Image (cartoon, rainbow, N blue to C red):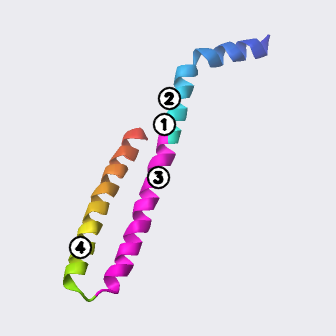
Amino acid sequence: MDWQQDILSKLQNRDVLVKEQVEALLTAQLWGKFDEINTKLLEIYGKMNNTLISYEFDRLQDQVWELKQERVNVSQKLRGIE
């Protein structure tokens, strides 16, 4: 009988379990996005160190700024979940 009560309890709490699973999946996706942004930033910083052309440097700086803003947005979403 204990296993039946366990199943009933789990069924009654399924909404909570589904919400937790959705949050875990979303958190994993957001961390993946955060890591992706950091990788792109490292690539751009590498390019910035190797460029002597000012307009190219400015373009790369703009990309860095956009990625940093995107990273802040991802961070805010992560804080909202936790």
State the CA–CA distance, disc 3 to disc 4.
Answer: 26 Å
State the CA–CA distance, disc 1 to disc 4.
Answer: 36 Å
Q: Residue at x 31, y 50 (%)?
A: 73
The question of residue 28 being in magenta is answered with yes
Callout 2: SS? helix
Coordinates of residue 77 in the picture (x, y in percent)? 36, 44
Q: Residue furthest right?
A: 1
Callout 3: SS? helix
Q: Nearer the viewer, residue 74 or 7?
A: 74
Callout 1: SS? helix
Which quarter of the figure has residue 49? bottom left
- The kind of residue tagged 3 is Trp
Neighbour tally class for label 4: few under 14, some 14-19, many 20 plus, Cα within 10 Å:
few
> Which region of the structure is painted magenta?
26-51
Q: Are marks 1 and 4 in contact (CB under 8 Å)?
A: no
- Marks 3 and 2, the one that precedes in the sequence: 2
- Marks 3 and 4, the one that precedes in the sequence: 3
Q: Which residue is mark 1?
A: 23
- Marks 1 and 3, the one that precedes in the sequence: 1
- Marks 1 and 4, the one that precedes in the sequence: 1
Q: Is the residue 72 above or below the residue 15 in the image?
A: below
Q: Which residue is mark 4?
A: 59
Residue 19's mark? 2
State the CA–CA distance, disc 3 to disc 2.
Answer: 18 Å
Q: Which residue is mark 3?
A: 31
Callout 4: SS? helix
Tag nearer the camera, 3 or 4: 4
Coordinates of residue 59 in the picture (x, y in percent)? 23, 73
- The kind of residue tagged 2 is Lys
- The kind of residue tagged 1 is Glu
Q: Are marks 4 and 2 in contact (CB under 8 Å)?
A: no
